[in-house]
Amino acid sequence: MKKLLFFSFVFMGLSFISVKDTVAPVKDTLSKKEREYAVKFLKGTENDVLNKIKGLSEAQLNFKPAPDRWSVEECLKHIAITEQALWQMTSGTLKEPANPDKRGEIKMTDEQLITMIEDRTKKAQTKDEFKPENTPYKSMDDALTSFKSDREKLIDYVKSTQEDLRNHVATMPFGMLDCYQLIIFIGAHSNRHAQQMAEVMADPGFPKN
C-alpha cells in the first residue's frame, strides 16, 4: 500500500511538471521598446500641455491674438475632444478582425508620422465638431479634467494591453495607420497644439498677468 501511494505521488508530480512545461508562454504583442516609447511619449506630451497652462490667469487663458485664432483655453478644448475621437477610432478598429494584409499600405514610419503631425508650418482646418465652441466643455476645468483622465487611461492601457495593435490597420485621410500609430498620433496631436499655445503666449499682446 505504501509503495502504491509513493508511485501515485510520483506520477502526480511528473504529470504536473509535464503540463507546466508544455504551456506556451504568452507572446507580447508589442516589443518592450515600443511599449516604453509610447508610454514615455504620451507622458511627455501630456506634460507639455500641462506646463503651458500652469499658472495662467483667466485673461491669459482667454487671450486671442486675432479674431480667427484660438486662445490657450480653446486649444485645450480642441485637444481634449480630439483625444476622445482618436481613441474611439482606435478602439473601433481593434474591435474589427486584424487585417495584417493592409500593413503594406502603411507609408509612414512612427517617426515620420510624429514629424508630420507636429509640423506647425502646415496648417489644417479641423472639422466643426472638433472646434472649441462646439465641444461639450463649458470651462477650462472641464476640458482639463477630461484631458488628464483620458490620457491617464490611455497610458495605463498601453502599459498592459496585449491587443495586436500593429496588425489592426485603419484608413486615415492621409493614408493607412496601424493602431499603435493611432495612439502615437494622440500624443503628437496634443504636442502640435501645445506649440500653438506657445505661439499665443509669444504674441506681443499677450497679457502680463
Image (tube, helix red, strand yellow):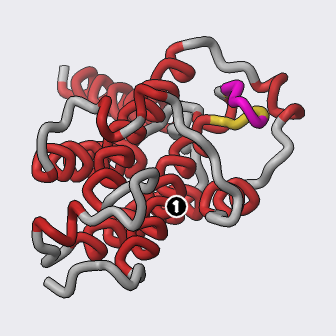
Quarter holding the C terminus is bottom left
Q: What secondary structure characterizes most of the magenta part? A: strand
* Element class at badge 1: helix
Quarter holding the N terminus is top left
**Residue 87 picture location, percent across and down:** 43, 33
Residue at image point 26% right, 65% down: 63
Where does the magenta region start and end?
A: 170-174
Query: Who is closer to the viewer here, 149 or 118?
Result: 118
- 29 magenta-colored: no
**Residue 179 picture location, percent across and down:** 59, 36
Q: Is residue 86 above or below residue 52?
A: above
Q: Is residue 97 above or below residue 138?
A: above
Q: Relative to residue 12, is residue 180 drawn left or right?
A: right
Mark 1 sits on what residue?
A: 192
Query: Who is closer to the viewer here, 200 or 27?
Result: 200
Q: Quadrant of residue 173?
A: top right
**Residue 90 picture location, percent across and down:** 51, 29
User: Quick one: which residue is furthest to the top in this view?
Assistant: 96
**Residue 147 picture location, percent across and down:** 26, 48
Crowdedness near tag 1: few (<14), some (14–19) or many (≥20) residues, C-alpha within 10 Å: many
Query: Who is closer to the viewer here, 125 or 7?
Result: 125
